[in-house]
Image: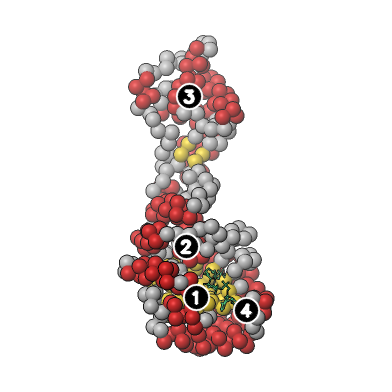
Amino acid sequence: MESRKVVINDTTLRDGEQTAGVAFNWEEKLAIARSLAAVGVPEMEIGIPSMGPEECEIIAAIAALRLPSRLMVWGRMRESDLEAAKDCGAHLINLSIPVSDIQLQHKLRRDREWAVRTVNRMVRRALDSGMDVCVGAEDASRAAPDFLLKIAETAQRAGARRIRFADTLGLLDPISTFERIRRLVAAVDLEVEMHAHNDFGLATANTLVAIQAGASHVNTTVNGLGERAGNAALEETVMALHQLYQMQTGIDVRGFGAISELVARASGRPVAPNKSIVGEAVFTHEAGIHVDGLLKNVLNYQGVNPKDLGREHRLVLGKHSGTHAVIQRFRDLGIELNEIAAAQLLKRIRLHASQTKRAPSTAELMSFYRETVASGPIPNLPEPPELPIIRNQPSERHSQS
Ligand SMILES: CC(=O)SCCNC(=O)CCNC(=O)[C@H](O)C(C)(C)COP(=O)(O)OP(=O)(O)OC[C@H]1O[C@@H](n2cnc3c(N)ncnc32)[C@H](O)[C@@H]1OP(=O)(O)O
Ligand SMILES: O=C(O)CCC(=O)C(=O)O
């Protein structure tokens, strides 16, 4: 892809915190904001001033940090929400309005004409308060396409700088996302921001496709936190932009592990071991063919380079191991196995894995080895080393790159 820059507007502190049961305290909000700014996230949506004075104070405290990131707050298309937001110190306000008929009629009990009039009036009012304005087109994916364009044109005429396309229920697939965003980008001279939800597991894919269709801004959350199934994950979106499209975001991905842990702790939502990019297990390998391939040349089974994230490949022994992995592991422990011994030990390791559902520790491996030596003559099998060698090899981690 071309060297066009895309702006990440991370909404961990707004949509992320909307996850049912999540409530960040003051320190956690400040710490998350600081961490996002430290890795170079250029924009963040930090809260909802209309929630009341306490929320406004937290927002103002984040603003007082004078982070290098632009700060957005969220509000409804209401005077009261604008009033609440105007002294918080945010640079941008996202004024949200549902644009699907279902939500206009059955949530707000309004019609399309009301929506157009309201966007026109509220954007102008918001500009008077000195903030830049984004119009949040809620439920845009279920809106009549021509009506969405009318809202966007109205927003532009009134002076908004951006329109957010919200796939509020996560109903789009990549092809429909591409078509809708391309149409929106072609119709208006506004920044276009994609806000994707993950109800079908497509949030990151839809976000990437929106960028291909011309979106200038995208919303993400750390660990993909957010309403229901969450939003597009920051770490997935940024890594994919860098690696798959050679697009730059200015974000230092080496900080993702720490931010992920911080947000997991603060949200009480642990990260699944297989969660892309930041999951504990995403660079761990057991399968014999994979480990053999990695040992011969790491590129055989390396899609993402763990070093880019400050991590390492980790090899573990288990039910699916092969003899090459066993030989290498014992070599690391100072023992050169022959193939017969490796095959015997592999059997023992498989039995252990089936019984315990975990990798053997170093001490257990050494005990398997002693059992193997004791069990009968295996040509050229050395005596087990003395204990200091075991103590010198405490780590279960094997760096391969
Ligand atoms: C899709 C999204 O994520 S949108 C963001 C949603 N986020 C949140 O709701 C989290 C924070 N929310 C809150 O703290 C509260 O809901 C508040 C402070 C915003 C509002 O609280 P309350 O005034 O008690 O209203 P409540 O939440 O029960 O109902 C929502 C009201 O907002 C109205 N509303 C909803 N969206 C909009 C909108 N975009 N523009 C104008 N009004 C809206 C509803 O019609 C309803 O108004 P009504 O009382 O006239 O029927
Ligand atoms: O209107 C917006 O700003 C988008 C709100 C949102 O979080 C959503 O629709 O999923």
Which residue does the image show at 47% across and 16% down from the upper left?
A: 370
Determine the image quadrant of residue 389.
top left
- Give the quadrant of ligand 1: bottom right
Residue at image mark 2 = 12
Disc 2 crowd rating (10 Å Cα; few below 14, some 14-19, many 20+) is: many
4 vs 3, front mark: 4
Foreground disc of the pair 3, 2: 2
> Do callouts 3 and 1 mark residues in contact (Cβ within 8 Å)?
no
Residue kind at label 3, given as amino acid type? Glu
Q: CA distance from mark 3 to mark 1?
A: 58 Å
| CB at disc 4 and ligand 1 closer than 8 Å | yes
Name the N-terminal-most of marks 1 and 2: 2
What separation in Å lies between label 4 and label 3 (alpha carbons)?
Answer: 64 Å
Of callouts 2 and 4, which one flags the residue occurring earlier in the amino acid sequence?
Answer: 2
Residue corresponding to mark 4: 108
Left or right side of 101 for 71: left
Verify CB contact (< 8 Å) between mark 4 and mark 3: no
The kind of residue on which mark 1 rests is Gly
Mark 1 lies on residue: 75
Q: Which amino acid is tagged 4? A: Leu
